[in-house]
């Protein structure tokens, strides 16, 4: 489903999210300076009269391409996320949470089904869920919840269980999504609801409004704009980019996070105004992170198998149930989110779920958790433990970094040299000492590799995981031209 272009503009004007005279097209995002739409970061804590409601609602907020370590509540050097920070102080923040793949559709499918990609089948963007998995929305709708989804990405996926689903393709997407969510909350405030909102601003291209360009050097005089063509050229150039260019690019990314953070603050203010902030479980996470030139000059996420793209934030807030200010250091995954939400709600967890209810961790109890497994389609397999990340690439596959529409003028030899992420047959990083995986140590750690290979062998056996070309073949057969073009416009290699 799609929002038409003129209706969102009128809604935004009516709600004060666009002042008169502002534009709303493309990369020029409208202002959110009105007092009614710009809450204090502390406003989620404000007391308000609470109508009698003896149920718990759920607001699940996922953010596209948002690295955990670029949020100030995770220790980032810049104050990128004051509203998320406030929510974190009022709930539990999980320190080490991992996506199963650095792409939106597979990661979100895992978030909603508590299944690994090899099981739910969405092993690349554009592939559809079948009707088999029990999605979180299906479980909650069976418990009497009214379920709605407002999505700025992956809206074409077969998300079952939602009686309302709105796909937002127009710009400014995050602001339209926020207004749509506020309207939906007002309409459903007296019902038991589950609302999922997916934001997209931190996904490239990066062009935040001026008031969110808070973290860069105002005297920057380089040529990089944050557009995808710019970043493709930077990735493929022989000389690379300099420190000033990189700092500028990262500051734009941080600005987009700051924009989405404000939208989350507005949603929290809506909950408070409606008297819903005390009986609504708020969950904030991301589908994946982003490579910011740490490995092979990459400035995207699809081709990456490393920490920056796989570690995601995760915060739970529910006053009276979840301890405020709790930090959870245990290694978890997006696969654990759906069973944890159900655990908090005292709803039975489907037997099909492969993740774990981690709610006891918030109370200081122990939960049996294993390592975090992940994949790059059916080509590369990896595992993250407390001490190591091990990447197993026996096919010597090099994931493509830049798609065809951004490769004009390059020769075949240049492409072969520069457009594949040269992941080795096996890579090992001691993440307990090298969290950004800058020193590859496989050659000197045979004993560790043997133990980690045994973990992967067990995973492959348990979930019938095989190295092959099955996903490539499915992509050719199943992804329709419109979806393929939309994904390529976002920088994905299809």
Image (spheres, rainbow, N blue to C red):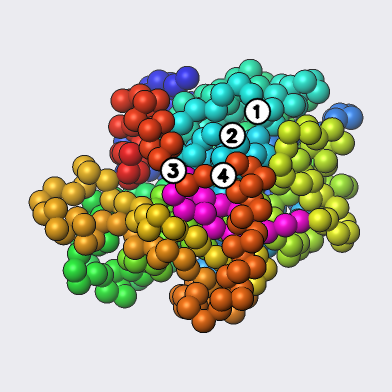
Q: CA distance from mark 3 to mark 1?
A: 23 Å
Q: Residues within 10 Å of mark 2 (few under 14, many from 20)?
A: some
Magenta span covers which residues? 369-383
Q: CA distance from mark 2 to mark 3?
A: 17 Å
Q: In the rendered view, does 74 fall on the left or right side of 336?
A: left
The residue indicated by pointer 4 is 465
Q: Are marks 4 and 2 in contact (CB under 8 Å)?
A: no
Tell me the SS state at disc 4: loop
Q: Are marks 2 and 1 in contact (CB under 8 Å)?
A: yes
Tell me the SS state at disc 2: helix
Task: Please indicate, yes or no, whether residue 269 appears anywhere in the rendered image.
Answer: no
Q: Does residue 171 show up magenta in the picture?
A: no
- Of residues 470 and 282, the one nearer the viewer is 470
Percent position (x, y) of residue 51?
A: 85, 30
Task: Please indicate, yes or no, whether residue 429 appears anywhere in the rendered image.
Answer: yes
Q: CA distance from mark 4 to mark 2?
A: 12 Å
Q: Earlier in the sequence, mark 2 or mark 1?
A: 2
The residue indicated by pointer 1 is 133
Q: Earlier in the sequence, mark 4 or mark 2?
A: 2
Q: Which mark is residue 120?
A: 2
The residue indicated by pointer 3 is 468
Report the residue at 56% width, 40% height from top.
118
């Amino acid at each position: 489903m799609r929002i038409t272009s003129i209706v969102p503009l009128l809604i935004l004007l009516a709600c004060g999210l666009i002042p008169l005279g502002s534009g709303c097209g493309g990369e020029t995002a409208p202002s959110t300076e009105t007092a009614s739409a710009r809450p204090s970061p502390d406003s989620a804590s404000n007391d308000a009269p609470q109508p009698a409601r003896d149920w718990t609602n759920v607001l699940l907020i996922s953010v596209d391409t948002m690295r955990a370590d670029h949020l100030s509540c995770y220790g980032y050097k810049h104050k990128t996320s004051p509203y998320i920070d406030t929510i974190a102080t009022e709930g539990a923040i999980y320190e080490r949470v991992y996506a199963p793949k650095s792409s939106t559709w597979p990661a979100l499918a895992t978030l909603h089904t508590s299944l690994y990609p090899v099981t739910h089948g969405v092993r690349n963007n554009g592939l559809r869920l079948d009707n088999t998995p029990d999605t979180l929305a299906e479980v909650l709708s069976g418990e009497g919840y009214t379920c709605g989804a407002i999505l700025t990405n992956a809206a074409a996926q077969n998300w079952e269980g939602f009686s309302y689903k709105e796909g937002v393709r127009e710009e400014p997407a995050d602001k339209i999504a926020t207004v749509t969510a506020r309207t939906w909350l007002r309409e459903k405030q007296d019902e038991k609801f589950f609302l999922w909102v997916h934001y997209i601003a931190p996904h490239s291209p990066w062009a935040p409004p001026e008031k969110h360009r808070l973290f860069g050097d105002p005297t920057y005089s380089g040529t990089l704009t944050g557009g995808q063509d710019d970043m493709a050229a930077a990735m493929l150039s022989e000389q690379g980019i300099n420190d000033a260019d990189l700092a500028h690019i990262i500051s734009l990314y941080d600005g987009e996070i700051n924009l989405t953070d404000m939208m989350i603050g507005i949603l929290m203010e809506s909950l408070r105004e409606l008297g819903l902030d005390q009986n609504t479980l708020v969950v904030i996470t991301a589908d994946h992170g982003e490579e910011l030139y740490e490995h092979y000059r990459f400035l995207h996420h699809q081709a990456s198998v490393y920490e920056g793209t796989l570690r995601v934030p995760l915060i739970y807030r529910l006053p009276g149930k979840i301890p405020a200010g709790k930090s959870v250091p245990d290694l978890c995954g997006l696969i654990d989110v759906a069973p944890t939400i159900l655990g908090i709600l005292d709803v039975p967890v489907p037997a099909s779920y492969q993740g774990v209810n981690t709610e006891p961790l918030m109370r200081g109890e122990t939960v049996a958790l294993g390592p975090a497994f992940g994949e790059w389609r059916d080509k590369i397999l990896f595992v993250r433990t407390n001490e190591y990340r091990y990447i197993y690439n026996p096919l010597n596959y090099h994931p493509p970094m830049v798609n065809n529409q951004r490769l004009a003028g390059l020769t075949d030899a240049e492409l072969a040299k520069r457009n594949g992420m040269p992941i080795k047959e096996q890579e090992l990083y001691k993440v307990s000492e090298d969290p950004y995986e800058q020193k590859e140590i496989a050659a000197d750690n045979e004993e560790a590799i043997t133990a980690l290979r045994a973990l992967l062998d067990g995973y492959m056996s348990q979930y019938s995981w095989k190295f092959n070309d099955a996903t490539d073949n499915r992509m050719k057969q199943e992804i329709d031209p419109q979806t393929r073009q939309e994904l390529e416009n976002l920088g994905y290699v299809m």
